[in-house]
Image (tube, grey):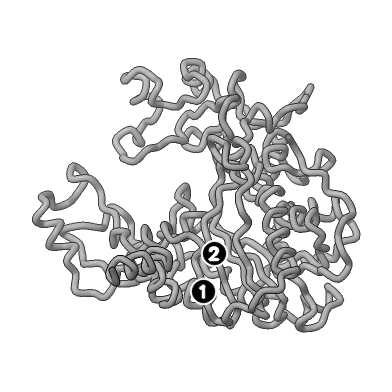
């Protein structure tokens, strides 16, 4: 399994407005499901050149989305309001990534989803597809540095609590008047040789009963599903005489020589761990990306934009180098002929930020299924999470995360409890924006159970 074969399968009537297009990974998946991209909006000049190189006839707007009117986008696409089948895109996600600074709404990129919604409101497509990193679930609307949390510092404001940014997003989505369903999807469950989790929102203007695409794969396989694809399967057939990759320093190579396949910095002797991690050795958390060497027998983890960085390392299983750009592209399932413009760092960024083509195709098929359905329409303005377990986890999450005791300004459990007992109304309540009917249903026993109980009582 490698790149998807993306041929001329699209139907002319299923037009897509692509926003934050990047290298077109998500759009190639929709294309494979029968949709046709009518216009792409992408401000990055390297990604725009990639689009021109591979799809020279595709109408392209190379501008920041906040500088482009919806009317201009529709005109470029040759569409009128209500004619687009889909508006799709992944608003800039760096502010929400667990790898970055997590500045959330304090970062201009963190409000790009509002620009996405602006185009949806103006273009009125039949459907929309919006995706983002998993980190958006817990992001705060206003970021407070970790070192400034805990006893000795001001109590949290509601907008500084975990999940407050996500609650704002849900409120905005509900206000669209579309039927919206969302969930966290693991790309490995859809035939991608990579365990990459994305939050996906699907919206229907006419209340067509959209469903999150059903997984075709699972970690262990069985129950009609195939096993996750391994790195070996994903890179099968990739032969490069002169691979393009970011070279590693001698120090990094010396460390990686001591790490087995599937391992990371924790496989090093204690004294070497300290030298390898430097200041990060005293920090906390899993730090699984530090000096990580991949395994042939498992899927790749989520591809980063810096596979040569010690904190986000994606070292080849048997060679002392990061995965190459072409290997990256194959794991994201781009066509073999797809080329990426710009220098090596820019190519890594384009491929690393893309949505795997296989996930895009699964989403496209879910849209087609809804279009072909004959069931009753869903209620407009309704926001539904397809995963009951996810809702329960989000509703129980802590208000914030603080440093371990050794790193706090004021130590002691009692001091922390007192600080956490803030009188603010925070604790972002995701359930406020998910249908009350859905919440009540989760508390009601199935009909079959209720009937059996009633029969026993009547005896």
Could you tell me which secondary element the residue under label 1 belongs to?
strand
Point 56% across, 45% down: residue:
196
Q: Nearer the viewer, residue 437 or 57?
A: 437
Query: Residue at point 57% right, 36% down?
Result: 221
Q: Quadrant of the N terminus?
A: top right
Q: Nearer the viewer, residue 68 or 402?
A: 402
| Dot 2 and dot 1 residues touching (CB under 8 Å) | yes
Tell me, for residue 182, which label it has, or none. 2
Kindly tell me whether residue 305 is visible in this rendering: no
Visible residue check, residue 407: yes
Q: Is residue 348 shown above or below 12?
A: above
- The quarter of the picture where residue 156 lies is bottom left
Q: Is residue 246 above or below residue 43?
A: above
Circle 2 SS class:
strand
Residue 383 shown left or right of residue 64 in the figure? left
Nearest the eye: 246 or 375:
375
| Residue 234 placement: quadrant | top right
Name the residue: 54% across, 75% down: 173
Q: Hey, which quadrant is residue 112 in on the image?
A: bottom right
Residue at the spot x=69%, y=54% of the render?
362
Query: How many residues crowd mark 2 within 10 Å: few (<14), some (14–19), many (20+)?
Result: many
Give the mark, 2 or 1, whose residue is nearer the N terminus.
Answer: 2
- Mark 1 lies on residue: 383
**Mark 1 crowdedness (10 Å alpha carbons): few <14, some 14-19, many ≥20:** many
């Amino acid at each position: 399994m490698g790149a998807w074969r993306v041929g001329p399968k699209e139907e002319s009537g299923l037009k897509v407005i692509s926003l934050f297009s990047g290298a077109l990974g998500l759009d190639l998946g929709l294309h494979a499901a029968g949709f046709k991209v009518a216009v792409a909006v992408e401000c990055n000049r390297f990604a725009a050149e990639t689009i021109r190189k591979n799809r020279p006839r595709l109408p392209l707007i190379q501008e920041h989305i906040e500088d482009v009117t919806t009317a201009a986008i529709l005109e470029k696409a040759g569409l009128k309001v209500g004619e687009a089948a889909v508006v799709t895109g992944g608003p800039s996600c760096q502010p929400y990534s667990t790898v970055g600074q997590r500045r959330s709404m304090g970062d201009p990129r963190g409000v790009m989803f509002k620009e996405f919604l602006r185009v949806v409101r103006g273009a009125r497509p039949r459907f929309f597809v919006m995706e983002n990193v998993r980190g958006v679930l817990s992001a705060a609307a206003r970021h407070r540095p970790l070192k400034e949390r805990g006893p000795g510092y001001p109590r949290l404001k509601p907008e500084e609590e975990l999940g407050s940014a996500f609650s704002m997003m849900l409120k905005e989505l509900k206000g669209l008047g579309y039927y919206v369903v969302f969930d966290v999807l693991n790309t490995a469950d859809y035939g991608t040789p990579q365990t990459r989790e994305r939050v996906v929102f699907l919206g229907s203007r006419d209340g067509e009963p959209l469903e999150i695409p059903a997984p075709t794969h699972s970690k262990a396989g069985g129950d009609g599903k195939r096993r996750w694809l391994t790195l070996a399967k994903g890179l099968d057939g990739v032969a490069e005489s002169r691979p393009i990759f970011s070279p590693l320093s001698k120090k990094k190579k010396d460390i990686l020589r001591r790490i087995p396949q599937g391992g990371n910095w924790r496989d090093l002797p204690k004294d070497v761990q300290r030298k390898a991690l430097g200041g990060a050795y005293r920090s906390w958390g899993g730090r699984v990306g530090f000096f990580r060497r991949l395994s042939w027998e498992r899927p790749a983890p989520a591809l980063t934009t810096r596979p040569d960085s010690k904190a986000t390392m994606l070292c080849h299983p048997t060679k002392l180098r990061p995965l190459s750009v072409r290997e990256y592209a194959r794991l994201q399932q781009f066509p073999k002929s797809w080329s990426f413009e710009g220098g090596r760092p820019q190519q890594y960024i384009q491929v690393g930020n893309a949505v795997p083509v296989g996930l895009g195709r699964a989403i496209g098929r879910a849209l087609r299924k809804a279009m072909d359905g004959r069931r009753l329409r869903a209620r407009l303005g309704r926001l539904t999470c397809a995963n009951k377990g996810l809702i329960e986890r989000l509703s129980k999450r802590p208000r914030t995360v603080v440093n371990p005791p050794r790193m706090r300004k004021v130590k002691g459990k009692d001091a922390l409890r007192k600080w956490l007992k803030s009188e603010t109304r925070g604790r972002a309540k995701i359930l406020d924006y998910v249908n009350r009917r859905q919440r009540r249903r989760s508390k009601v026993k199935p009909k079959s159970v209720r009937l059996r109980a009633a029969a026993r009582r009547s005896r």
